[in-house]
Image: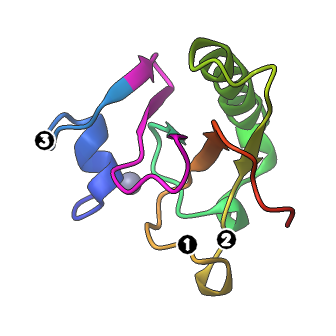
Amino acid sequence: MKNCIFCKIINKEIPANIVYEDAQAIAFKDVNPVTPVHVLIIPKKHVPSVNYLGFKDKELIGDLFLIAQKIAKEQKVAESGYRLSFNVGKDAGQTIHHLHLHLMGGEKLPFA
Ligand SMILES: [Zn+2]
């Protein structure tokens, strides 16, 4: 989608520290990390948020979690622990309206 920063990363129009890529998804380090390990896993298809997912996206969503699992191992947080979260809408602090799964770890996270 035009003017979507994540679509631009997918199209390699803007650089990102990409840690994983396949035909359906891409993962890269958050430019403003809030934890030592902070990776965003996103579908290549532009979906604004969880609110816009349908049953046809079941496999795609499952893939995002399996990619997260793989990255957690690579980033050495699989055993120490990590958080996976989708922020949806303004009250949750979603600032980029292209679905993204946050993978955060590398330190003790606040319980929330
Ligand atoms: Zn997008």
Q: CA distance from mark 3 to mark 2?
A: 26 Å
What is the three-letter code of the residue carrying label 3? Glu
At x 80%, y 33%, the residue is 81
Q: Name the disc covering residue 13, or none.
A: 3
Residue range corresponding to the magenta coloring: 19-38
The crowding category of the residue bearing disc 2, from other C-alpha atoms within 10 Å (few below 14, some 14 to 19, many at least 20), is some
Left or right of residue 108, residue 3 in this image: left
User: Which residue is disc 2 drawn over?
Assistant: 88
Question: In which of the image's four quarters is ligand 1 placed?
Answer: bottom left
* Between discs 3 and 1, the one toward the N terminus: 3
| The quadrant where residue 71 appears | top right
* Between discs 3 and 2, the one toward the N terminus: 3
Q: CA distance from mark 3 to mark 1?
A: 22 Å
Which type of secondary structure does the marked residue at label 3 adopt?
Answer: loop
Q: Name the disc covering residue 94, or none.
A: 1
Q: Residue 22: percent from the left, percent from the top?
A: 46, 16
* Between discs 2 and 1, the one toward the N terminus: 2
Q: Residue 28: percent from the left, percent from the top?
A: 41, 34
Any magenta on residue 95?
no
Front position in the image: 14 or 55: 14
What is the three-letter code of the residue carrying label 1? Gln
Which type of secondary structure does the marked residue at label 2 adopt?
Answer: loop
